[in-house]
Amino acid sequence: MAMDDGNVRYRVEIARPEQIGEAQRLRYRIFAEELGARLAHADEQLDRDEFDEHCRHLLVRDLTTGRLVAGTRVLDQAGACAAGRFYSQGEFEMADVLSLPGRFVEVGRTCVDPGYRNGAVIATLWQGIAGLIRHWHIDYLFGCASVPFNGAGDTFGHAVIRQLMERHLDTDIRARPLEPLAPRAALPAGLSPRMPPLLRTYVNLGARACGAPCWDPTFGVADVLMLLDLRQLNPRFARHFLPGFAAAPREPAFA
């Protein structure tokens, strides 16, 4: 599946087993070198864990160079069963979410090369996710969307969380954080920060936050569990990010 932004063409593909290491190296460059995460396999310059072997890894390439410029991993229920749980269950108690009738996928470890953080790359990545949604007959998509923090008193991070809780909180479905983010007593009035790109895409598509965030000390972020009911997509953004989601299920059209 390819997309053209007028200058550069991008393609999304499902990684072959021998390509997963390439995705793990990109994740290391973004999460460890750029964002300062303390990863278990830093000596190998890889971000890898026990879930990787059970996921489908989506890769976005710049067709002019062949360079890997973005990636994410997608875990379905069969993969979660083989792994013992969804990744998010290591951060949240999720009984409310997982008791919903239907089929789930979890999206995680999404990252984009700093030189390619544009709408065309993000849209291409989500179009790959859409292909898997159609193929697997998915009803709900969820994942941990991260809000970066520079410390316990980080104003930006707490302002993003406040905005999310006030405007995009699910009123019925809750996920309880296993390590809750320590609250901040007060924030300056009138703060309305721009959300991180992945979180902003979730919200634009119609996803809801399932409660308070979990603190992730490895990545130095607050994770919010976002749940997207695919029957309640925002049609304006779905046409761009999840095209054809309502079409008859078919094999994903990856190049």
Image: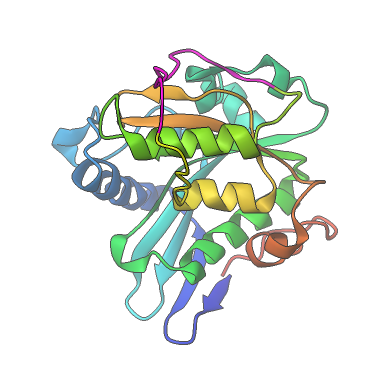
Majority secondary structure of magenta residues: loop
- Residue found 72% across the figure and 18% down from its top: 96
| Viewer can see residue 214 | yes
Magenta-colored stretch includes residue 60: no
| Viewer can see residue 226 | no
Place residue 248 in its image quadrant: bottom right
- Residue found 73% across the figure and 45% down from its top: 136
Q: Nearer the viewer, residue 37 or 236?
A: 236
The answer to whether 183 is drawn above or below residue 123 in the figure is: above
Q: Identify the residue at the far bottom of this view.
A: 6
Would residue 208 appear left or right of 73 to someone viewing this image?
Answer: right
The answer to whether 73 is drawn above or below residue 98 in the figure is: below
Q: Nearer the viewer, residue 7 or 61?
A: 7
Place residue 2 in its image quadrant: bottom right
**Picture coordinates of residue 241, whole percent (x, y):** 63, 61
**Which quarter of the rendering shows the N terminus?**
bottom right
Magenta residues, as a range? 174-187
Q: Identify the residue at the far left of this view.
A: 43
Colour theme: rainbow
Magenta-colored stretch includes residue 183: yes
- Residue found 72% across the figure and 66% down from its top: 239
Q: Nearer the viewer, residue 196 or 142?
A: 196
**Picture coordinates of residue 119, whole percent (x, y):** 49, 68
Q: How many marks?
A: 0
Q: Nearer the viewer, residue 64 or 18?
A: 64
**Which quarter of the rendering shows the C terminus?**
bottom right
**Picture coordinates of residue 4, whole percent (x, y):** 52, 81
**Picture coordinates of residue 137, whole percent (x, y):** 78, 45
The answer to whether 69 is drawn above or below residue 52 in the figure is: below
